[in-house]
Image (cartoon, helix red, strand yellow):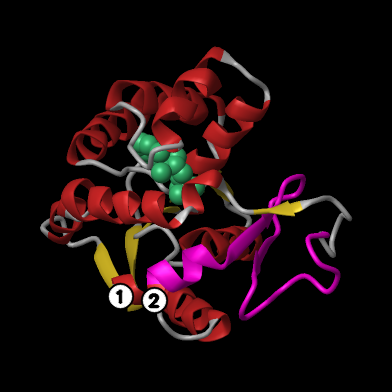
Amino acid sequence: MHLIFLGSPGSGKSTQAKRLAQKLHLLHISTGDILRDAIKNQTSLGLLAKTFIDIGELVPDDIMLRLIKEELTRERKGFIFDGFPRTLAQAEGLEKIISDLGINISRVINLAVPDELIIERLASRRICRNCGQEYNLITRPPKVNSICERCGSEVYQRPDDDPDVIKNRLAVYHQKTRPIEDFYRTRGLLTEINGSGNFDEVFDSISEVVAG
Ligand code: AMP
């Protein structure tokens, strides 16, 4: 099975994708996580990516397509793409890469959440610096302030979750990523799911669609 999760930043797609990947034994490929790891390890990719991520802009398409091609050539298991593709050029590039590898996309899940809710969610989102566990200061704060309950490391706010950067990320999403919805809709692959409900409800809806 080869799935793509679309949705704005803060739509909950990463948390849902991780859980579904675990349930279905699929590889979870998050380009945001790959780029953040590269930044942490100060690789040349990381140094370059940071200049875009910090201001809420997208990393250039040719870099992202090269990165995905490497991932897919190495790994032949089923996958869930989380945060990729993010532009029409990436969607078209991906089509070429997977057709060369004999892979078909099984379904594209689009998690729809209104912008007002996204801004609220992202401004209160906190993440463990070490294991990536997500918290929310309003709905799920860590039991001890700023300490991860899973691994004891520091819980922090992503620099790109700053309110000004969030506004830009949403603008970029509407301008560059939303056109992908039509790309997959015309191929009969897109299913839209309301991502505003609670985590378990949304997960059940996704699981139903994927079970087909
Ligand atoms: P995410 O964790 O998916 O919200 O990604 C964080 C940031 O990484 C985004 O705001 C972009 O700057 C960058 N990024 C992640 N995936 C992509 C992609 N497919 N294309 C371009 N930039 C990306």
Determine which of the numbered discs, if any, sits on residue 78 in the image. Answer: none
Where residue 140 sits: x, y (%)? Answer: 68, 77
Label 1 SS = loop
Dot 1 amino acid type: Pro
Q: Quadrant of residue 57?
A: top left
**Residue at the spot 68% in from the left edge and 23% down from the top edge:** 41
**Residue at the spot 59% in from the left edge and 26% down from the top edge:** 38
Asked if the residue at tag 1 contacts the one at tag 2, i.e. Cβ–Cβ closer than 8 Å, the answer is yes
Would residue 188 be found to the left or right of residue 169 on screen? Answer: left
**Start and end of the magenta stretch?**
118-147
Label 2 SS = helix
The residue pinned by badge 2 equals 117
Where residue 180 sits: x, y (%)? Answer: 20, 51
Dot 2 amino acid type: Leu
Determine which of the numbered discs, if any, sits on residue 114 in the image. Answer: 1
The correct choice, above or below, for 207 with respect to 85 in the image is below
Q: Nearer the viewer, residue 207 or 13?
A: 13
Residue 22 included in the magenta stretch of the image: no
